[in-house]
Image: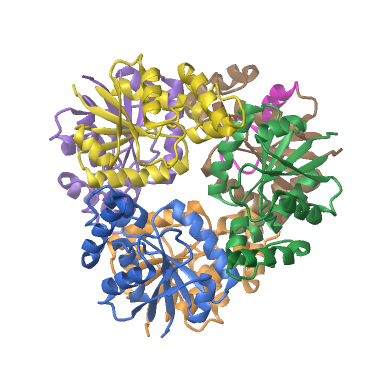
Chain colours: A purple, B yellow, C blue, D orange, E brown, F green
C-alpha cells in the first residue's frame, strides 16, 4: 500500500480533454493528485490564474482524490513543499518527449525525491494542445471536441472576444 | 491510499544497473512490483530464463515489495492475469520512445485497465543496454560498472565463454 | 485534369486496416492506384505472394480505380514500367519517416519522374503494423480490429497454425 | 481521370527556391494548384501580403495550372471554400515532420474531405527556409542560390534595408 | 602535424560548465581554439557582451590555446576572417542535432573551407543549457553545479536582481 | 600545432562516395587518419576483410595522411592501441545520430582519452549507405554515382553474382 502524492503541472490555458484524460488516469494510480497551474511559464495567458483554477475545479469535480492549486516558482520546489513522489506528464509526440526528458532530468537533479512519470496521451488527443485550441477557436473553428463540456461556452466566448 | 501492482517487463539478458535503477524507483511509487522475464521476445538469449530469473532475484533481494516471474505470451494478457494497474518502462532515448509509445498504445487497446508508465533512466545509465553489455563483455571490455555487483562474475564468465 | 497512376507498395504480410485506409484515400486523389506486393523485401513471409494478392483483391474489391500486382525488383523500376507519377506511403511515426525519407530520395535519384507522396495514417491506426498483427495473433491476442473483415478468419487461422 | 485542387499554403516571407520546387512538383500531379499566403501566422513579416503574392505570381508565371491567393483564417476552412482535395507540404527534416503531422491530423479533424500530402524537399534545398534567407540576407550573406532569380534583387534590397 | 583554428561560437548568456567542457575538449584536438560570442542572435541577453567575454576569459584562463572574441555577423564570414578550419558544436540531444545539422549545411554552403565538428556533451551536462540556468536561477533554485566556480556568485547575483 | 591521430571506423561493405567524403574531410583536420575495417560487426559481409581493405586503399591512395587497417575487438581498445585522439563519424540523419550518440558515450566511458567527432555528410550523400548500395546493385539498379570510380566495376560484378 502506498499513499503517493502525484502532481500534474501545466499552464492549462485552457484545460483540454487531453489534460483531463491524463489527470483522470493519474488519479487511478496515485493516492492524491494535485493539478497545479504553474504561473511563471506562460507569458501572456488567455485566461487568468483564477479562471484557470476555476475551470480545472469544474472539470475535475467528479474525481475524489484530485485537488487544484497554483504556484509561482520551480516545480521541483513545489514538489518538495507538497511532499510529492511523482510528477505526471502526458506525452503526445517526440518533440514533447525531448523537452520533457530534459525537464525530468533537471527536476531529478533539483529534487531527487520526486520521479517524473510519463503517460501516453490517448490516440484521439494526440494532436491536441492548448495553443491549437486557442488558434482554432480564435478563427471561429469548432473546438467543442477539444475542451471539456462544462467549460466549453466560457472558452469559446473568450477566444472570440480576443480575436476581435 | 492505493495498492497498485506494477509490472516491469523485459528480456533481462542480462539485467543491468539501468534495469535495477528503474525497478527500485518503481518500488517506491507502487504497492507491488513484479519484474517479469518475457520469454517470447529474445530469439537466442545468452542466459536461460531460469538464470535470468535467478539473477533478478539476487539483485532485487533487498527490495521488499518486488517479486520476479516469467511469462510466455502477450504482456497485456499477463497484466490482466496479475490484475496490474501499471506497466513500467525506462526511457533512455528517442528510439526507445518511438517503439515504446507504439507498444503502449497497443497494450492500452488490448487491455484498457493497464497504464504504461515511463520513467527516464538516470543520466549515468543513458547509454546502457543489455546488448551493449553483451557486445562489450564478449570482447573482454570492462563491464563492471554496467551490471549489479552480485552477479558480475557470473555474467563476465558467461560472456567470455560465448566469445570463444 | 490529370490522369496520374499512383503506386502503393508494401509487403502486406498481411494487409491491415491501416493499409486499406491509405489505399482508399489515395484512390480519391489519383486516377489509377496500383497496390503492389514487393516480393524481395520480406525474408520469411507468413503469407505467400499469391495469398497476399488475393487478400488485397478481396479487400479492395469495392474501389473501382484500384488494381493489385506483385513485383520482384526495384520500386523505381516498377514505377517506370507502369509509367507512374506517384508512390504513396503512409506515415505513422518518426521512425517510419526517417527511413521513408531516405527511400524517397533514393527513388527520386533512380527515377526522377516519380514523386513519393506521404499521407498520415489515421490516428486510430497509428500503432498498427503487419508485424504487430502477426505478433499479437500468434499469441492468441484479439486482432479483429486490425485487419479487414473479409479476410479476418483466414489471417487468424494462419497465425494460430504458425504459433504451434 | 481526376480534377483535384491542391493547396500549397505558407507564409512565403519570402518565397524560396525550395517552395518553388514543391509547387512545381505538385503542379505535375494535381489538376489545379493554389498557392495561398496564410496571413494570420507570421507576426511581423518582412514583406507585405501584396508583395508576397506578387513575388509568387512572378515566380510561378510559367506554370499553367498554378494560381496565387491569400487567406486570413483556418486552412481547413479555406480548403472547404475552394473545394480542395489536397494540402501540399514539403518536408525537410524531422522537426518539420512532427509539427506538420499534428497540423495534418488537426486539419483532417476540422475538414475530413481534404488530405494533407507530404513531398520531400530536394536534397539541395534541405537546409533552406525563409527565416534562414532573411537571417543570412540581413547580414549581407549571399542568398542568390536560395531565392528565385526574378525576385532576387527585390529581396536582397529589402533585407539590407531592414538590417540597417 | 596540423595547425587548425577551431571556433566555438555561442551566446554564452551565461557560460555553463557544459560549454566549458566542450571548449576544453576542443582545445586538446585543435591547435587554436577561439571562443566567440555571437552578438546578433540573442534578443535581450541577461549579460552584456563585455560581461560575457569577461566571464569566458576568467573560466578559460587555464587553457593555453584558447582565446575569446565577439562578432556581429555571419558565423561563416567570421570563420573566413579567422581562417578557421573547424566550427565546434556540442550536441546534447536530438532537437539540438536537427537545428545544428541545418546550420552546418548552411555554413558549408556559405564557406566550403570550414567543417562543423560535433562533440557529444558529457552525460552529466545533458540537460544543461544557459536558458535553464537563467530560469532556475531567477526562481532562487540552486545553480552552483551548472556554472563554473569562478563566476558563480556574479551569475547568481545578476539572476536574482533580474527576478525582482 | 597538434598531431592528433583520428580513426574512421566502419564495415565499408563496400566503401561508398559518402565514406570517402568523410575520410577526405577528416584528413584536412587531423595529422593522421586511420581508416579501420571493424571485422566483428557485420554478420555476413558481401566483401571479405581483405577485399574491403584493398578497396579502401585504392580509393584513398591520393590522400597522403590516410592509412588503412582492420581490427577485431572494441573500438575503444583499438583507439588506445593506436594512441588516437579522435574517432570520426559521419552523420546522415537522426537515426544515425541516436545510435552514434550512445556509442560515443560508451566509448568515452571505456576510453576517456578519445573523443568522438561527428561530421555531417554532404547533402548529395544524405540517402547513401552501404546496405542501400548492395540492395540497389543486387537488383541491377545503377549504383555508379554511389561508389568511387576505381572500384565500381568490381562492386557491380560482385553484387550481380550474389543476386543470382
- Left or right position of B164 against B35: right
Q: Which residues are magenta?
A: E38-62
The structure residue drawn at horizontal position 47% and vertical position 34%, both measured from the top left corner, is B46
Q: Quadrant of residue E14?
A: top right
Q: Nearer the viewer, residue D138 or A113?
A: A113
The structure residue drawn at horizontal position 80% and vertical position 43%, both measured from the top left corner, is E82
Q: Quadrant of residue A30?
A: top left
Quadrant where the C terminus of chain F sits is bottom right
Q: Nearer the viewer, residue A112 or B146?
A: B146
The structure residue drawn at horizontal position 77% and vertical position 33%, both measured from the top left corner, is F82
- Left or right position of F52 against D52: right
Q: Quadrant of residue E84?
A: top right
- Left or right position of A50 against D161: left
Q: Is residue B142 above or below residue A120?
A: above
Residue E30 image offset from top left, x and y in percent? 78, 35
Residue C74 image offset from top left, x and y in percent? 53, 70
Residue E45 falls inside the magenta stretch: yes
Amino acid at each position: 500500500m502506498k499513499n503517493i502524492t502525484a502532481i500534474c503541472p501545466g499552464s492549462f490555458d485552457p484545460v483540454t480533454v487531453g489534460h483531463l484524460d491524463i489527470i483522470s488516469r493519474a488519479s487511478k494510480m496515485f493516492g492524491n493528485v494535485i493539478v497545479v497551474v504553474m504561473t511563471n511559464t506562460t507569458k501572456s495567458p488567455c485566461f487568468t490564474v483564477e479562471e484557470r483554477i476555476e475551470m480545472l475545479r469544474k472539470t475535475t469535480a467528479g474525481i475524489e482524490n484530485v485537488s487544484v492549486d497554483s504556484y509561482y516558482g520551480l516545480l521541483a520546489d513545489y514538489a518538495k513543499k507538497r511532499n510529492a513522489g511523482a510528477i505526471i506528464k502526458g506525452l503526445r509526440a517526440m518533440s514533447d518527449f525531448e523537452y520533457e526528458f530534459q525537464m525530468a532530468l533537471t527536476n531529478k537533479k533539483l529534487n531527487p525525491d520526486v520521479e517524473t512519470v510519463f503517460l501516453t496521451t490517448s490516440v484521439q488527443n494526440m494532436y491536441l494542445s492548448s495553443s491549437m485550441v486557442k488558434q482554432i477557436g480564435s478563427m471561429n473553428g469548432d473546438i467543442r471536441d477539444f475542451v471539456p463540456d462544462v467549460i466549453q461556452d466560457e472558452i469559446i466566448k473568450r477566444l472570440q472576444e480576443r480575436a476581435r
